[in-house]
Image (cartoon, coloured by chain):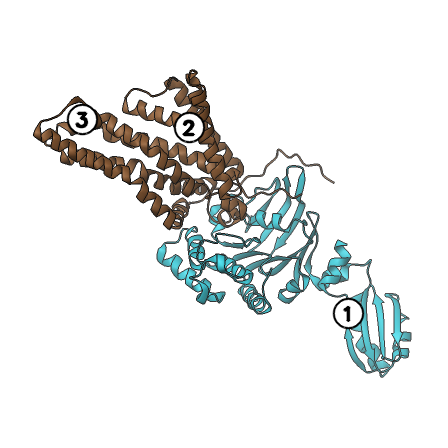
Amino acid sequence: MKIESIKLSKWYGQVIGVNNLNCSVEPGITGLLGPNGAGKTTLIRLMTGQLRPSKGSVRINGEEVWNNHRLFKNIGYAPEKDAFWSHMTGEEFVYSLTRMYGFDHDQASAMTKKAIETVEMTESKDKKIAGYSKGMRQRIKIAQAISTDPDILILDEPLNGMDPIGRRSVIDLIRKMGKMEKIVVVSSHILHEIEEMTDTIILMSHGRVLAQGNIYEIRELIDTHPLKVVIRCSNVDVLTAKLMEYEDVKSVQFDREQNQLMVETVKPSEFHKRIPELALKNNISIYSLYSPDENLEAVFSYLVR
Amino acid sequence: MPIFNESYHTWDGYLKERPGTWFVIAKTGVKLAWTKGLIFLLIFSIIPFFVGAVKIFLFSKVQDVGIMTPQIKKIVEDVSFFYDFLKGQMFYLILISIFTGAGLIARDRKNKSFGFYFSKPVSFWDYVAGKFFITGAYGFLVTGAPALVLFIIKVLISRDASFLSNYYYLFFSILGASILSVITMSSVVLAFSAVAQNVRTAAIFFFTFLILPDILRKIFSNVPFVGVFSLTALLKQAQAYIFNVQTPYGFSDISMITAILLILLLSLVILKLKVRTTEVVS
């Protein structure tokens, strides 16, 4: 299964939502990242068939999504907005939306019950949505998205306004869906939320895809910003001297008091392979090694800002 | 950077089966509209029905004792009785339309809820038909339904089959006149609901649309054509036309038909423009 965007563009009058965008999403969790106005919601609406592309196409397993109602049956979608149908109870809300897929009363009731249980809303299902907290609204939205057990789950900012416990349970739920070989697309502009769920991202800005793939692989490809690596070891002087012999090492800063050095390298993979070898040859104990900018935030800031 | 031609659209998808989602929308809406306020309104609107039923009953008794006078006959004259009843129910139809219809699309627009519908196998027509059914069903409940029940009472209470054989067409006149009123009123209220972003604004727009032309019609009573701008006048004229009784206003039937068709068309255009998921990113 695969969602493909091929030369996809969408205009809102003079405003470009997404621009000549090519990307593909495969089973597992994919984080859709970008600052506000990047085109995330537009891309999601195109993927869920709510918008017709101005140019290009979005395809699921080779089939055009727009107006293809058969495909819609396999897509679960939770929009970003949470101010909806407050006069309904949570159960009525999930049930009525499940029925829209064409299921009869018994099937829809069973699916509703299961989905509400999954998001742990059973106790509150008979309360009006008007009385729900933001976190409860997010969960009930997710319940309607997963009620039909779709193969594709698209969640627009699903963790907005959730308390830490609620966030944890939703993250666990999303991870579970990802492990079930379903395509799960989660949009967010909160980077650590995505980082907790997946390493696979689509990074957008100004309607374009800036990068797609594994966060670490993307990081390696950013030549303009050498990767920073912090090493704590038993002999800072020797290790500094040895590292300076390599061309890919652009700078080394060291702190003798803390037995720590910070290296900037343009070839992170080779660098990481080299460290154990150097440590063994020179009898240096490595206490810790980490990269402060090999994370989503760094990738995001280097590519977007 | 490529320059795109905005007129070009890719479309090689295909429509698949629709699982009658309009009915799900309609059923949910009908259920949710069933509030204390609506029940009170429905009870209030049923008073003329009881008055009509009593009139029919008393009329049959007067016939039995043979003291029929032209004045009494005028009260329950067979055709105009039903026409007058439907004309009177127009007031309740307006109230019910506002009560059930003003918020139907306005709330979805305000809450940006279209995504919930259109990410499912729901088309524009499913959505509009579902919403339309909600206000239409309640509208029919205060117009066509009581009128048809009165007709049945009249048939049952008659001493012989002469009423049914002479006036059977009234059944279809009632049905036609009430359906036309309900369709037109529902379309207009949904169009205003689609334009507004909250219930109150939609109700005010709708009410103004009904009242203002009526005031103008009364001010310019010497210019009969002004009546075509009044929806209530148009519908009363159409009902008179369907019942084949004397039309109450001076404008022609062609003007009436054209104006109603234009109102329906305009409502549809507004719905088509407003019911969609796009939002302009500023």
Shade representing chain A: cyan
Which residue does the image show at 23% across and 35% down from the upper left? B52
What residue is pinned by disc 3?
A: B72
Shade representing chain B: brown
Side of A58 relative to B51 (left or right):
right
Kind of residue indicated by mark 1: Ser
Mark 2 against mark 3, which lies toward the viewer? 3
Camera-nearest residue between B204 and B260:
B204
Sequence-first tag of 2 and 3: 3
Residue B126 image point, x, y percent: 43, 42
Camera-nearest residue between A210 and A123:
A123
- The crowd level at tag 2 (other Cα within 10 Å; few <14, some 14-19, many 20+) is many
Which residue does the image show at 56% across and 58% down from the upper left? A183
Kind of residue indicated by mark 3: Ile
- The crowd level at tag 1 (other Cα within 10 Å; few <14, some 14-19, many 20+) is some
Secondary structure at numbered mark 2: helix
Which residue does the image show at 58% across and 63% down from the upper left? A162
Q: Chain of mark 3?
A: B
Camera-nearest residue between A205 and A210:
A205
What residue is pinned by disc 2?
A: B231
> If the image is split into quadrants, where does the C terminus of chain A sit?
bottom right
Numbered label attached to residue A291: 1
Is residue B27 in view?
A: no
Residue B93 image point, x, y percent: 36, 36
Alpha-carbon span between mark 2 and mark 3: 32 Å
Q: Chain of mark 1?
A: A
